[in-house]
Amino acid sequence: MKEMQLSREVSHLKRSVMRDLLALAVDPHIISLAGGLPTGELLPIKDFQDCLHDVLERDGSAALQYSPMFRPLQEWICGYMGTRGVDCEPTQIFITNGAQQGQSILSRLFLNPGDVAVTEEITFTGIQQVTSGRDMCMRTVPTDLATGVDTEALEIVFRETPRPGMAILIPDFHNPLGVSLTLEKRQAIASLSAQYDVPVVEDDPYSPLRFKGESLPPIKAFDESDSVFYLGSFSKMLAPAVRLGWIVVPKGLIPKVTVLRESFDLETSTLIQRTVSEFLHRDLLAPHLEELASVNRERCACMLAMLEKELGDIATWTKPEGGLFVWVTLPQEIDSMAMFHEALEKRVIYIPGEAFAVNGGYANSMRLNFSNVTPAAIEEGIARLAGVIRSALTE
């Protein structure tokens, strides 16, 4: 077959390293600190099954047809956003197939190939795919590992010419850094978005996974100019396979977002929407999140204690109050990507920090997941990993 002429976009897209590593994670002999999954034993299988059964019994064929967004689900999400300080109406809740689709929709709403997009220097690979992966001109800003994105640097890139078409930031329990924005920085970002007329996409799938400390309002709660677009997701707070999320959209942009969404895949499964809505209206989410918080608190504490025991003299790491990840910074001479195969031989895996670096660098870093690993496996995995790191230091 002769070579075909492909689009510029597909030539710039790169496969997520994490998707490849998930294939390794199924090997029962490998301790995976690489994934971004909730613990499987706490997924609400029976409750979800009961909700699905009752939806089919009650709604019949309507649950299996094409359908507009399910209004009771929009109303629940609207109420939830209200508890977080965001004033919106149900019609502003635009249902998506997860937060990643929300990023894709907003990227196409605001950015043409070649436009300027702003992200953090270290950010989730999906964010990279909808910005640099679409051939954008990237401006990046550093992230403080204690307080979140550098807002002074953000103002500098916002006021540069040409004006950015969009910025994407992660406010809570950052993937991969584990850090959360301070209250002052959330307020500042909303103000900068309005002042410089730069839409800010607030990618927030992790805030419901807090297990320590006090919850903070999202950036959107301080948005007085309709320039902050909030993305939420049930993938981490309920189950990844539901592939259900939402965007809080200004009323005037709903028609544009709707048309863009139709060009992707028309709509989100009404069966999934109705089943998740049933789960929510039965008040099953709060106890589920409490159980997740209890387990994640224990596992995170275990990982931090093991890091201190095994690597306290040579490494530093973030100390998240929720979410799924710890970011580890190793001595400068360590290359975590080059070291990966040695770790694999010792049957422990992680995500090299370089995978999250928009402009390269950060080779001496790694992301570790604690949520989908038992405490015993965390202890063994960190011990194995420490051996690999110390061996690399002596080479």
Image (cartoon, rainbow, N blue to C red):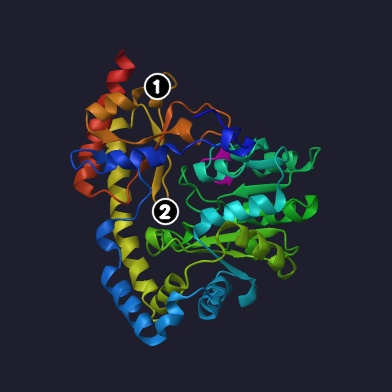
Q: Position of residue 316 (x, y in %)?
A: 41, 34
Element class at badge 2? loop
Q: Real-space Cα distance between discs 1 and 2?
A: 26 Å
Q: Name the residue at 55% across, 28% down.
A: 3
Sort mark 2 into few (<14), some (14-19) or many (20+) by Cα contacts within 10 Å: many
Rendered residue at 39%/76% (across/down): 279
Say whether residue 277 is visible: no
Element under disc 1 = loop
Q: Nearer the viewer, residue 257 or 1?
A: 1
Residue 185, image x, y percentages: 63, 51
Residue that mark 1 sits on: 334
Looking at the rendered structure, the number of numbered marks drawn on it comes to: 2
Q: Position of residue 327 (x, y in %)?
A: 42, 39
Q: Look at the image and say whether residue 151 sits in the magenta stretch.
A: no
Label 2 belongs to which residue?
323
Q: Is residue 145 left or right of residue 326?
A: right
